[in-house]
Amino acid sequence: MDRARQLVLLDRIMAHRQAGTTDLVPASYRQPVEQYVSPSRAAAERDRLFRATPVLACLTADLANPGDYLTLTVGDIPVVLTRASDGVVRAFRNVCRHRGAQVASGRGSAGKVLTCPYHNWSYRLDGSLAAVTSRQGFDDVDKSCMGLSPVVAAEAHGMVFVRLEGSEPIDVESWLGGIQEELSGFGLERYHHVETRSNARRINWKLTFDTFCEVYHIQALHRATIAPLIMSSATLFDAYGPHCRVLAPRWSIDELDEKPRESWDLLSHATLIYLMAPNSVFVYQQDHAELWQIFPTEDPDHSTMLIHLYAPEEPTTEKARTYWRKNMDLLMQVTDTEDFIMCEQIQSSFKSGAQESIVFGRNEPGLIHYHRSLDQLLAGETPGKAPDESPAPGETVLQAADRSSTTDHALVAGS
């Protein structure tokens, strides 16, 4: 993030700290409980959000070198991504054209081919069929038509996106809605993948996502763990198309009160949470980055997560590897024993009949923006374009409020 942008955001935080305020919207929002439990809604989300919409599949760091591959399941479709010798990232359905087995699992370096473990058919990293065992058994098969089924992929700003349906290229710049202006400043293409862990919980995938959309809960739920580090107030919110960023100041920001403005540094004193529709959360945390990918299952009461940790330098010593392992352990401990335990209770309560909707407060604009964006994507609309009161990329919420009418979409500061 460039210096000028950091100072703009710090000025907003400092104004909130002085006034005892935080970014607010003029009206709270009612979110239907049905959207977390409905099988028909879940099916529509898998079809529209995870097939017809670009999905953040990984970072450039996950496919750092030619020969690298990575697998994941997007919605209910197995996908394999590769970086071939020409340096281009490609994506395919992870399905052998012989009998349908998956040709790769996990991640790693494949060299020049991916080999199906069922009958040893192999595929080049550009997806073309490389070799068939027992050639005479398939001498009447046109092998030029037997390559892996392609998936549209695009790489930009240190991120890789895929879209399962359609053949037209992904317009990454348009899809990101301006949020790339901040993300590209982190130099993600130079980061190194450290570790990935998976987690399956009895939680609707959107409810899992919700826990990242606001920091209001930190003061209560995390009072013994991260509340002494991260504030629940003076929080900033900015929208970028269907995506948004929630910025949570750390208590260490108090140190800046004694320093001249020209020496202020935002990234040392804040956690930046980028909510990337439909299902990814990118978190910048001082000395590392995290990517959370949250996927639905056929059962609306379940979801799966992939949690990735990245470092600006490759951990080449045991000391460095131990340091990052402990960071990951702490991250998983806090979310597993606090956030996701609470989310499982909430998911269970949704079936109690106690309420038809839950409330997103005026101080939770990330939640409101995210769910409105999902509704617009499901309806085939362009999210984040209306109403006009939403902040433009790089515009502060106060500037947006100055030029907007007072509606439930306009962002203002308040106590």
Image (cartoon, grey):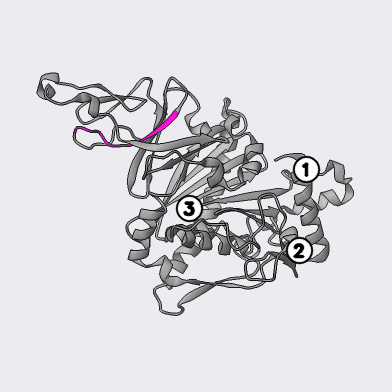
- The segment highlighted magenta reads 89-98
Marks 1, 2: nearer the viewer: 2
Residue located beneath label 2 in the image: 402
Residue located beneath label 3 in the image: 278
**Location of residue 367 in the rendering, given as x and y in whole percent from the top left corner:** 56, 62
Residue 237 counted in the magenta span: no
Residue located beneath label 1 in the image: 4
Task: Name the disc covering residue 254, or none.
Answer: none
Where disc 3 sits, the SS reads: loop
Q: Nearer the N terminus, badge 1 or badge 2? A: 1
Q: Residues within 10 Å of mark 3 (few under 14, many from 20)?
A: many
Q: Is residue 209 left or right of residue 137?
A: right
Distance in Å between CA atoms under marks 1 and 3: 29 Å
On screen, residue 368 above or below 336: below
Q: Is residue 24 left or right of residue 306?
A: right
Residue 92 counted in the magenta span: yes
Distance in Å between CA atoms under marks 1 and 2: 21 Å
Q: Residue at x 63, y 70 (%)?
A: 408
Q: Residue type at mark 2?
A: Asp
Q: Residue type at mark 3?
A: Pro
Q: Is residue 216 left or right of residue 197?
A: right
On screen, residue 101 above or below 29: above
**Location of residue 235 in the rendering, given as x and y in whole percent from the top left corner:** 70, 59
**Location of residue 55 in the rendering, given as x and y in whole percent from the top left corner:** 46, 46
Asked where in the image residue 388 lies, by quadrant, the reply is bottom right
Residue 403 shows up from this direction? yes
Residue at the far bottom in the pictured view: 354
Q: Residues within 10 Å of mark 2 (few under 14, many from 20)?
A: some
